[in-house]
Image: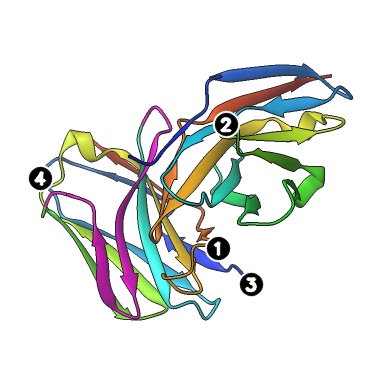
Amino acid sequence: AQSVAQPEDQVNVAEGNPLTVKCTYSVSGNPYLFWYVQYPNRGLQFLLKYITGDNLVKGSYGFEAEFNKSQTSFHLKKPSALVSDSALYFCAVRLYNKLIFGAGTRLAVHP
Amino acid sequence: DTAVSQTPKYLVTQMGNDKSIKCEQNLGHDTMYWYKQDSKKFLKIMFSYNNKELIINETVPNRFSPKSPDKAHLNLHINSLELGDSAVYFCASSHDWSGAQETQYFGPGTRLLVL
């Protein structure tokens, strides 16, 4: 079955430090992977996606994600975290025309 | 300007009532979706419509009935509301349903509380 795992409930990082939010996937066939962010009391905002091509995908707000087929991972990264990056991050895999979401990882960036 | 909009933003109601949530997108997309986010923030798809036709129904109780009057609107009607229906309901849309690379764009959510 297609699934996505986000092994960390919460990630804490100091402002200015690099951040990584982890995601692993289990799919049959080619994976189509997405990252979304949810700010408090807001809807989900699309950050980036991997369909094919370069393993390093660049997205909104300075975020990027690295697709690693051998490790079945699609970790979200940012070189320098901002306090305003604090939010709930969801990894998702597309199955037919629906998104299967991970459980979400709360990112807390401390000043 | 809002691409995907939902009304109402908040909905507080009593058990047993019937309520509707409306969704509209101005992106010109053909496909629309309803997702449910539970109290633990877990997101799961409920329905998907393509050009007013139902294409996904994820074993949702038949108290939930989506209606798509045109491809820009997908409303969700819920009969006989139960406590467990309390959640945030998100509407989303995408250009079409068949392309795996299609990005889904989400509305701001409707927070439903059943008392």
Disc 3 and disc 4: Cα gap in Å?
36 Å
Disc 1 and disc 3: Cα gap in Å?
25 Å
Please name the residue that numbered disc 3 is placed on.
B1
Tag 2 and tag 4, C-beta contact below 8 Å: no
Disc 2 and disc 4: Cα gap in Å?
40 Å
Judged left or right of residue B35, residue A8 is right
A15 or A29: nearer the viewer: A29
Amino acid carrying mark 3 in the image: Asp
A79 in magenta? no
Classify mark 4: residues with Cα within 10 Å, few (<14), some (14-19) or many (20+). some
Judged left or right of residue A32, residue B98 is left
Name the N-terminal-most of marks 1 and 3: 3
Q: Quadrant of residue B40?
A: top left
**Quarter of the N terminus of chain B within the rendering:** bottom right
Q: Are marks 1 and 4 on the same chain?
A: yes
Magenta stretch: give its range: B39-61
Amino acid carrying mark 4 in the image: Gly
A27 or B50: nearer the viewer: A27
Classify mark 1: residues with Cα within 10 Å, few (<14), some (14-19) or many (20+). some
Please name the residue that numbered disc 1 is placed on.
B101
Amino acid carrying mark 1 in the image: Gln
Of the numbered discs in the image, which one, if any, rests on residue A23? Answer: 2
| Mark count | 4
| Disc 3 element | loop
Disc 3 and disc 2: Cα gap in Å?
33 Å
- Indicate the position of residue A101 as horizontal and vertical percent values: 45, 41
Chain assignment, label 1: B
Q: Nearer the viewer, mark 3 or mark 4?
A: 3
